[in-house]
Image (tube, grey):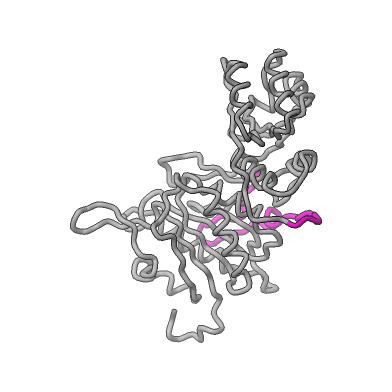
């Protein structure tokens, strides 16, 4: 906090450190990387004092590597944000990059009626490294969380990911590079903001119409879901074995092109039998960008006749977290199938 400002009038943020590369510093004696205590964030990033805000910090103890993230953390984060929504002007979540898109998508479905920013960010290099991208990502995430329109309402009233100059809708992102600073992309939806000399927002891309659904939603995710990527040579017997996994309730099927799959009768009958047993199967493309349009080719059309649901232009990350969330609710298979094709949080172009 700055001594020259009345802290009661300053915007107030909540910073949540889950783990990941951004929170690492180098031990001066051993040279090894270790997690630093975010209570000392101002010591490592003194530039935050120039933002004229106050913030509280919460962190996972011990920090969780992003490859070890589970739905239990999504639920913990979602409940924390929901419970503290009116106490803070915005939230900044520091997260490992590997599963950030999954967490951003999961939070978007949990946080109904969100009216303030929840910004996830991280880094490719530890914040203690000389060439770190962590400081810029962190500072800009703060600025975005603090940004307001002329009427005083938050500029970004949704879950978003900021990384290397771009702000994206959280449930539209995917990690596409393990070595570039520009590690994230939103192939099927425009960016919400670009941070150059100034931060330029894209008002037409920000916000979405949240449908009114009369249902008592619970903060939970059904983990009896699998992501299955088709490839030439996938045997029908192996496919049948996977689809007979005890307790399996949902499948995100990554198909070819605009939703195409093999048309041999054994493959199709195996898929149809799984749907008839009560398994919800959602078709998304395994391409980097584009949308599933199953009626475009015969190979996709026959798949739709088995009861497979078209996932449109959802990312795999959004499709799997949305399916897990819906399956955890007290909904019929038909309702889940319907809602998978409805844009709940701007995750899908209808």
Is the residue 43 above or below the residue 331 in the image?
below
Q: Nearer the viewer, residue 195 or 208?
A: 208
Residue 350 visible somewhere in the drawing: no
Classify the position of the N terminus by image quarter: bottom left
Task: From the viewer's perspective, tell me whether residue 262 is left or right of residue 306.
Answer: left
Residue 276 visible somewhere in the drawing: yes
Residue at point 45%, 86% (across, down): 4
Q: Nearer the viewer, residue 266 or 33?
A: 266
Task: From the viewer's perspective, tell me whether residue 298 is left or right of residue 27.
Answer: right
Q: Nearer the viewer, residue 22 or 235?
A: 235
Residue 101 in the image: x percent, y percent? 55, 47
Residue at point 43%, 74% (across, down): 49
Is the residue 52 above or below the residue 326 in the image?
below
Circle count = 0
Is the residue 223 above or below the residue 262 in the image?
below
Residue 97 in the image: x percent, y percent? 46, 48
Classify the position of the C terminus by image quarter: top right
Residue 300 in the image: x percent, y percent? 73, 23
Quarter occupied by residue 269: top right
Residue 24 in the image: x percent, y percent? 34, 56
Residue extending furthest toward the left: 29
Any magenta on residue 32? no
Quarter occupied by residue 215: bottom right
Magenta part of the protein: which range?
A: 189-216
């Amino acid at each position: 906090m700055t001594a020259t400002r009345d802290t009661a009038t300053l915007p107030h943020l909540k910073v949540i450190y889950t783990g990941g590369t951004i929170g690492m510093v180098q031990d001066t004696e051993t040279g090894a990387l270790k997690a630093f205590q975010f209570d000392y964030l101002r010591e490592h990033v003194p530039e935050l004092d120039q933002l004229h805000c106050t913030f509280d910090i919460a962190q996972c103890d011990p920090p969780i590597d992003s490859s070890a993230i589970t739905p239990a953390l999504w639920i913990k984060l979602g409940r924390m944000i929901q419970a503290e929504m009116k106490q803070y002007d915005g939230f900044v979540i520091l997260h490992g990059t590997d599963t950030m898109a999954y967490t951003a998508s999961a939070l978007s479905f949990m946080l109904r009626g969100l009216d303030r920013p929840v910004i996830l960010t991280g880094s490719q290099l530890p914040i203690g490294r000389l060439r770190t991208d962590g400081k810029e990502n962190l500072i800009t995430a703060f600025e975005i969380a603090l940004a307001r329109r002329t009427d005083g309402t938050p500029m970004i009233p949704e879950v978003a990911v900021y990384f290397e100059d771009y702000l994206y809708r959280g449930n539209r992102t995917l990690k596409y590079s393990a070595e570039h600073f520009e590690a994230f992309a939103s192939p099927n939806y425009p960016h919400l903001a670009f941070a150059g000399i100034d931060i330029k927002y894209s008002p037409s891309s920000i916000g979405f119409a949240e449908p009114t659904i009369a249902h008592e939603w619970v903060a939970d995710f059904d983990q009896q879901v699998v992501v299955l990527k088709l490839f030439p040579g996938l045997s029908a017997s192996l496919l049948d074995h996977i689809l007979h996994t005890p307790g399996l309730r949902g499948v995100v099927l990554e198909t070819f092109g605009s939703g195409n799959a093999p048309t041999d009768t054994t493959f199709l009958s195996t898929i149809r039998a799984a749907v008839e047993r009560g398994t919800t199967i959602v078709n998304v493309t395994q391409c980097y960008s584009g949308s599933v349009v199953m009626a475009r080719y015969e190979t996709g059309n026959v798949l739709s006749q088995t009861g497979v649901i078209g996932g449109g232009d959802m990312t795999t990350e959004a499709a799997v977290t949305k399916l897990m969330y819906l399956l955890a609710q007290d909904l019929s298979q038909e309702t889940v199938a319907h809602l998978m094709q409805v844009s709940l949080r701007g995750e899908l172009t209808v």
